[in-house]
Amino acid sequence: MRGASAIRQLTAARNAPRLAAAFVEHTVQIWDLDKCQRLSEFESVFEFGGDRVTLSSDGNICVAAGWTKGRRGGVAAYDALTGSPLWHRTDIRQTQFVRFSSAGDTVGCGAETGRFQLLDAHTGATVNTLTGVKKTFDSPFSNLLLLETRSRGFRIKGSRDLSIPSETFALLDVAFGPDVLCLSEAGGPVRCLDCHSGVEQWRYRPPSNTHVLRLGYRPADSCFYGVQWEYERGTSRTLFRFRHGSERYEEICHLQSWDEDFFSDADALITSDGNVISVATGEIIRRLAFPQKDYPDPIV
């Protein structure tokens, strides 16, 4: 047996030094990233398998989702510091994606089938539905919105709607800059697109059997960052920086985690093994004492 982090999924608040760290099922912890202190731990409807946990921009509300509907599933919101339930949508099933809007007033909820729902962040009531949509990502710099559709394509919604063809079967991550966005697809490229015209600015083609799982934009240097994984062999991941305005990149450091998230305007990366890494230097600047679990040794 070998020991490793029990944390399987991470999501950081956009405007506060807080992080939600979820186990395989139900248990969620909230951490203060400045003090490296666990603030709370509570049971939720969370089930590992999709993007099923999200934290409000101020870090005060945690929303989690499960695969099944009902009392033990659905989509539910919790007070991040006490774990007290705020609302629970027991009627929603097969949830694969939940994400707070940048403004923090709604939670996007995408299911395996059916319409995409926008839920009121404070009540859980459905305020809007979108047909043929799997995921949505909104820009923190403007009112632009990227939609992943069920027809294997993307739409950028702003002053005018733009259609962007997909190149593989699934979207992995999106990061917005002020005038451009980057998107990464499973087993496919990272593309940088002009937000207003949809014109491709550049693309990065990962090596065979490799893709970029996470993307972040750092205003401090106007660069996009990525976490790349060689998924066929399951080897270590790499944090790298795209040089400003191009597909040229430089490796920053190697990772041994199985989930990561950028935070604090992408100045740092938090990993599931508890490391807080400066993206400028690749150095570990803090450590979180995440709980550990024993896993079977891999068969060689």
Image: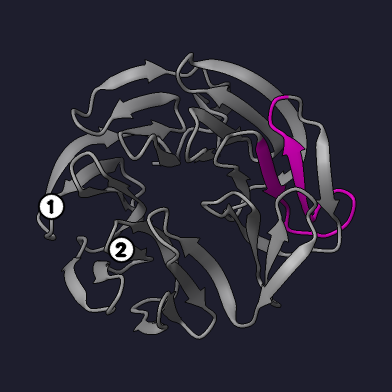
Q: Which of 236 and 160 is in front in this view?
A: 160
Would you say 40 lies left or right of 71 here?
left
Q: Residue at x 42, y 61 (%)?
A: 172
> Does 2 appear above or below 203?
above
* Residue 93 visible in the current orientation: no
State the CA–CA distance, disc 1 to disc 2.
13 Å
The type of colouring in the image is one colour
The residue segment tinted magenta is 61-81
Q: In this view, does 245 lie to the left or right of 136?
A: left
Image coords of residue 31 (percent x, y): 56, 24
Residue 177 lies, with reference to residue 79, above or below; the image says below
Q: What element carries label 1?
A: loop
Of the numbered discs 1 and 2, the one sitting upstream in the chain is 2
Quarter where residue 93 is shown? bottom right
Residue at mark 1: 244
What kind of residue is marked 2?
Leu
Q: What residue would you read off at disc 2?
A: 181
Q: Position of residue 122 (x, y in %)?
A: 75, 48
Q: Is residue 126 above or below residue 64?
A: below
Any magenta on residue 40?
Answer: no
Q: How crowded is mark 1: few (under 14 residues within 10 Å), some or many (20 or more)?
A: few
**Label disc, if present, on residue 82 of the rendered structure:** none
Name the element at disc 2: strand
**72 left or right of 224?**
right
From the top left corner, tell me how far across and down residue 62 is, in percent.
Answer: 67, 40
Task: Name the foreground residue: 110 vs 117.
Answer: 117
Q: Where is residue 23 in the image (x, y as percent from the top left)?
A: 63, 35
Q: Residues within 10 Å of mark 2 (few under 14, many from 20)?
A: many
